[in-house]
Image: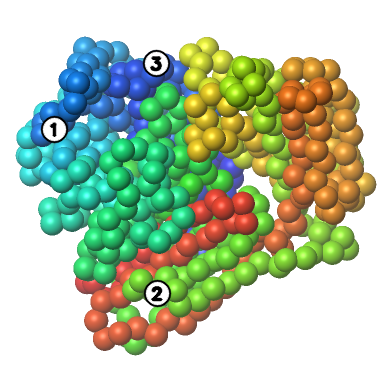
Amino acid sequence: MLGRTGDTAGTGTQRYAILYGDIHNHNAHGYGIGSIERSLEVARGHLDFFAFTGHSSWHDMPTMEGGRERHWIDGFKRLKETWPRVQQVIAEGNRDGSFCAFLGFEWHSSQWGDQCVVFPQDHRPLFYASDVETLRRFCLEERALMIPHHLAYPTGSRGVNWAVFREDCTPVVEIYSEHGNSEHDRGPFDYFTHSMGGRDTTNTARAALGKGLRFGFVGSSDDHAGFPGAYGEGLMAALVTDFTREGILEAIRARRTYALTGDRIALDFAVDGAPMGASIAAGRRAEAAFRVAGRDELDVVELIQDGRVVHRAYAEEQVDAARAFEQPVQLRLEWGWGPWAALALDRVCDWALELTVTQGRLTRFYPCLQSMPFDETRRHRFERVTRGGADGLAIRSYTARKNAYRENPNQSVVLEVVGGADTILTVSLSEPAAQRVETRLGDLLERSHNLRTGPFPRESWQWHRLVPLAASALEDRVTLDLPGGRAYAYLRARQKNGQLAWASPVFINYV
């Protein structure tokens, strides 16, 4: 029943599996690139679930200079024409217990804000509406989710319209995607990748929570390159009791979800024993409890109550060698860098490598896969292998600077390893160059190991400095002082590499 990472949350008798997915992404069945078959295969390769949400319509599209409306209109036409194919691929792609695929579409609106519709069942129709209430009635009839995204653009410019928000088919909102971060207007990952402007304070998630609205948090990529779950563009986690589409939807409707930028940070957050997303009754005090397991060194974990940080917790900065290997450690292997267009050497580089762990054990791994470069046929592959009794991982991958999201062309994987200072990590590289490099785990406690595949400006790869458990994990309990009326509290975790996670709020005295 567990997802591919084996991450779990919950206390006592109630345990949840943490599943990672992307329920808002695009491809050529709309105005993106890539086939629906590619999207499904990419998602299945590194996620637990995904929903494809093809571009369907924009009833109040403004007139654009030079007739550029055709970009959108032609995309809507392509989705309509290929909808039977999309329906079939999604229906055949679902595998309860190992991978779940959902059918969906995206409805654009300047006035009401864009909405992603996610169906609970297969072979459902596209639906066209010129107002948000008509769309909502359709979603209620279908028992479909209706999720607003890129919230913080101004109302009237496809930002959220909180005036028409309702919980019935909108239990969660998308607070992070490739557009940026809409938790609040001072946070990292500002809106700058599109021409719709910066963040509007009044349309942020924090502003709406301050008005008493109730919703959970999700992230999704909004990737347009047919690459669901693209690293850094947005991801979500669902705390489920059942690895099925019904189990995932139940978690979303209960707001047992959290948003991530990229790294699969495991979050567990509860107030008075009630999990993230819950609504509870309480007196003037409540106890918040959290557990965080990062995929890199943690910078800070913050507890936010009613828009204010009321508690900050920090992991250990320095962990000595005697303690570092008492628990599993994490290592990030990263590859890419390489030529850029300014040198007229922009290219796609294929990678083939095999990693083995000697005198130790590889327990888990977390792919961190960028969406670019686009290629309809290339795939990133990770396969567990055993060589001479040693645990290993065979990796096929590709990198390029062309169109890299926020100019980062690299791919990486985070490994969890049980071992000691004398554990040896061996990388046998066959593409783009033949190399065999051994690295001692104890040496990575002190410094990274940086390597090149050839003279400048050829591609590079590196082992990052290892991360002991004490530097990447935290748990704590905090007493909340509550006002007489409603209150909300949520958790925000930030790693030192800038990756973030936000647990859905617990709503206190909303009932």
Q: Which residue appears at 46% of the width and 55% of the height?
A: 188
Q: Nearer the viewer, residue 48 or 294?
A: 294
The residue most toward the right is 422
Q: Earlier in the sequence, mark 1 or mark 2?
A: 1
Q: Looking at the image, is 208 positioned above or below residue 132?
A: below
The answer, for residue 471, to whether it is visible in the render is: yes
Where's the C terminus, which quadrant?
A: bottom left
How far apart, in angstroms, are the residues tagged by discs 2 and 3? 44 Å
Q: Can you identify the residue that label 2 sits on?
A: 308
Kind of residue sitting beneath label 2: Arg
- Residue 375 placed where, x, y %? 51, 16
**Disc 1 crowd, CA 10 A, few/some/many (<14, 14-19, 20+):** few
Q: Can you identify the residue that label 1 sits on?
A: 62
Kind of residue sitting beneath label 1: Pro
Q: Can you identify the residue that label 3 sits on?
A: 35
Q: Nearer the viewer, residue 229 or 447?
A: 447
